[in-house]
Amino acid sequence: MVTKRRGSARVCVMQELHTRTEREFVHTAALHIADAVERAIAQRGQCILGLSGGSTPRPVYEALATMQLPWEHLRIFLVDERYVPADHAESNQHLIKETLLQGTNITTDHLCFPDTDLPLSQCIERYALSLHTLCSDHLPDLVVLGMGEDGHIASLFPPVSELALGDQALIIHTITDAFAVHDRISVSLNLLACSDEQLFLLKGEKKKKIWAEMLKSKEGDSRWPAKRILKGERATVVWG
């Protein structure tokens, strides 16, 4: 289903894909990512893919790992990360290594992950430089996102700071008291919004409720960072 929503600047087209079972949700999401990867590689020989962590995308990444794709042409970065060691159970890069990388021939030089062994400020600085290099010729082809029950995407927690909303920083340090790991590293909202496509993976009635609240709300990007995503033209939501 394609739903037209009016943003603050223009009409955007948001595609909503509703699934009925966990298996259908995983298959639909994995197929959407695979299609985006293949299109980008066919068009320009490479795909830049931004991934989120969490329990919702885990089976999607596991399904992707079983697909026959030109993995050697894929470049992966994290849209956010917890500031914990790379082998920590809460680490997003640990999740990617446990799932997607288990069944593919993606090499480490095609991964753009924060080095969380560094002091936080150095970690952010180095990740920003790495991501700037990765995206120097082309912005991300697809970013995979979730949405928290407070409305956050990536690790951009409301109220989102002016630094995260603006053009001055590519990588931002954010802090939350809502989860066990307080210190987070997140890409800026602009990079997410400027990607060619965005895919939201959302499951459950609570997510439907907060999404509907966002669409009805007159508050802007600081309260609802996903609103900036929806001002674009290539956002898709897979509902489970």
Image (spheres, rainbow, N blue to C red):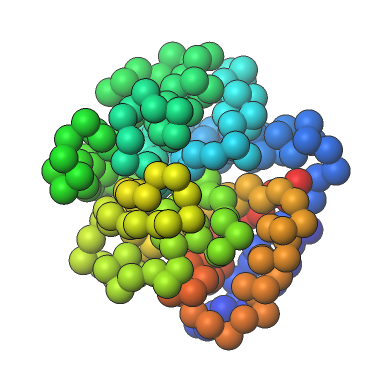
Relative image position of residue 239 (x, y in whole percent): 73, 50
In the image, what residue occupies the spot 36% across and 63% down? 190
Question: Which residue is at a point 37% across and 50% down the rendered structure image?
Answer: 182
As drawn, the residue found furthest toward the right would be 20
Screen quadrant of the N terminus = bottom right
Residue 81 on image: x %, y %: 37, 42
Observer able to see residue 10: yes
Q: Is residue 25 left or right of residue 150?
A: right
Residue occupying image coordinates x 61% and y 60%: 149
Q: Is residue 65 left or right of residue 17?
A: left
At a point 64% along the width and 24% down the height, the residue shown is: 63
Compared with 119, 74 (above or below) is above
Q: Is residue 237 above or below residue 29?
A: below
Above-or-below relation of 73 to 133? above
Q: Residue 44 in the image: x percent, y percent?
A: 40, 38
Would residue 72 be seen by someone viewing this image from the given angle?
no
- Residue 38 placement, left or right of 183: right
Tag count in the figure? 0
Q: Which of the two residues, 159 or 169, is positioned nearer the viewer here?
A: 159
State the residue in front, 71 or 30.
30
Where is residue 197 shown, x and y percent of the image? 52, 52
Which of 46 and 154 lies nearest the eye of the viewer? 154
